[in-house]
Image (cartoon, helix red, strand yellow):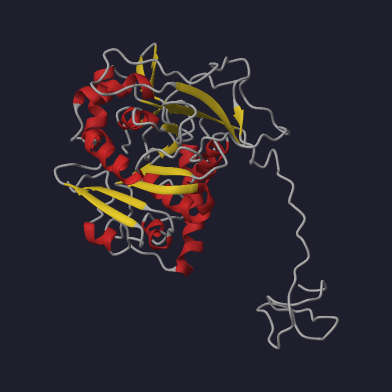
């Protein structure tokens, strides 16, 4: 979203330790003054994502079908404080979270696109096992594209809010260059971490922090920018500081380029809604309507918003909510995330807070692998790719249709 400000090397604040009390749940107090049409979440909780404490939030009836909402880079879940209430009032349960190192979530030693997706999966695991609606803005939209490809059984619809990455902003990278990129990215990241080890965000007043954000988000209402400061920042003796980890920076996704996510769009099998703000902004991907239309899947729908920039859910929340609700139709009477996830006995590292929810599918609580029943096949004269053993009955290499239990 925006770099917010430059980090300054200084004496670090006291780090969070076991003696430092953790709030029983993430703060959802409404700022004063508020913002017209904005509403803070109805509920919040901590989620233990592989040992990292992630702040999760919900708007709407806890028994309603779920819209799973991912925010963009250098942002936090409050970006949905206008859109989520409108969807919740229409009968949906909106679930979002602060990404690691953002908002109220815990800072991490390292950050990557894949780590953010693992955190997203951990939050989803605490909500339901059923397919739900995925919705993402900006970087969150790219993440939801990747997750739709990786876990297609977890979603029923995909909504992308100006998060369809384009080649326009980044040069393509040949496959053989990606290993070289990995070395360079990791080396650069570690050097950066050493330089920034004692850094903090610059302090200032609420107006100061809002003004810094406005430099990268010039289209947003100054009153909105001041509204989000007390949510995404903390007041210290010398002023307010954004909570975003000072070590985070643009391009900190690892050896990854945004347009790689676009490669997954044509193969998505669920209905897709892509909403694009047509006013160019520095924080956007530079994506054009043709970029989207040329990659739209068979169940895809494209909507371009004239006069709206990258933050479509903030500039035009009513229009975006109308499009999303029209696309989804009436909330399903059954399913859609209404059923809680199957509980599993927690083991390994305990949650970092007494109210933390352990994801039932994290490595800390492995799910036993079911026993595979014997396959029923029939002989065939050709071999299966990669097979090296032969059938003990007919000396044929195994294929996808072979009767004997002694097969690859």
- Relative height, residue 262 to residue 74 (above, below): below
In the rendered image, the residue lying farthest to the right is 392
- Residue 336: x and y in percent read 48, 40
In the rendered image, the residue lying farthest to the bottom is 381
Q: Residue at x 43, y 45 (%)?
A: 252
Q: Classify residue 130 as left or right of residue 387.
A: left
- Relative height, residue 254 to residue 52 (above, below): below
Q: Classify residue 342 as left or right of residue 253.
A: right
Q: Residue at x 56, y 35 (%)?
A: 339
- Residue 247: x and y in percent read 44, 36
In the rendered image, the residue lying farthest to the left is 307
Q: Quadrant of the C terminus?
A: bottom right
Camera-side residue: 201 or 96? 96
Camera-side residue: 392 or 77? 392
Residue 173 sits in quarter? bottom left
Looking at the image, can residue 250 be seen?
Answer: no
């Amino acid at each position: 979203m925006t770099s917010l400000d430059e980090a300054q090397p200084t004496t670090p604040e006291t780090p969070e330790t076991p003696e430092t009390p953790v709030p029983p749940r993430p703060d959802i107090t409404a700022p004063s003054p508020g913002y017209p049409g904005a509403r803070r979440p109805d509920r919040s909780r901590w989620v233990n994502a592989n040992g990292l404490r992630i702040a999760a939030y919900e708007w709407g009836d806890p028994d309603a079908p779920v819209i799973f909402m991912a925010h963009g880079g250098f942002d936090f879940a409050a970006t949905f404080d206008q859109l989520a209430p409108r969807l919740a009032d229409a009968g949906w349960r909106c679930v979002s979270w602060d990404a690691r190192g953002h908002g109220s979530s815990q800072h991490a030693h390292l950050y990557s696109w894949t780590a953010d997706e693992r955190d997203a999966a951990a939050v989803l695991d605490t909500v339901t096992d059923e397919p739900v609606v995925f919705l993402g803005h900006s970087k969150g939209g790219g993440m939801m594209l990747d997750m739709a490809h990786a876990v297609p059984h977890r979603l029923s619809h995909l909504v992308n809010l100006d998060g369809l990455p384009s080649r326009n902003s980044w040069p393509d990278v040949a496959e053989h260059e990606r290993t070289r990129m990995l070395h360079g990215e990791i080396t650069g990241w570690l050097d950066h971490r050493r330089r920034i080890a004692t850094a903090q965000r610059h302090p200032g007043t609420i107006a100061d922090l809002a003004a810094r954000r406005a430099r990268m988000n010039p289209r947003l209402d100054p009153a909105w920018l001041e509204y989000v400061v007390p949510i995404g920042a903390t007041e210290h003796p010398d002023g307010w500081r954004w909570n975003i980890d000072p070590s985070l920076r643009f391009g900190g996704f690892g050896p990854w380029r945004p347009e790689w996510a676009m490669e997954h769009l044509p193969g998505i099998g669920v209905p897709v809604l892509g909403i694009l703000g047509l006013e160019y902004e520095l924080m956007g991907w530079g994506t054009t309507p043709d970029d989207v239309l040329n990659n739209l899947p068979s169940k895809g729908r494209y909507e371009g918003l004239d006069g709206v920039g990258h933050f479509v859910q903030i500039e035009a929340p009513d229009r975006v909510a109308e499009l999303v609700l029209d696309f989804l139709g009436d909330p399903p009477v059954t399913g859609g995330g209404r059923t809680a996830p199957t509980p599993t006995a927690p083991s390994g590292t305990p949650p970092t807070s007494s109210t933390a929810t352990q994801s039932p599918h994290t490595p800390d609580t492995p799910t036993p692998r079911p026993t595979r029943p014997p396959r029923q096949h029939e002989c065939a004269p050709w071999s299966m790719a990669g097979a090296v053993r032969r059938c003990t009955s007919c000396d044929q290499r195994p294929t996808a249709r072979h009767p004997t239990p002694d097969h690859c």
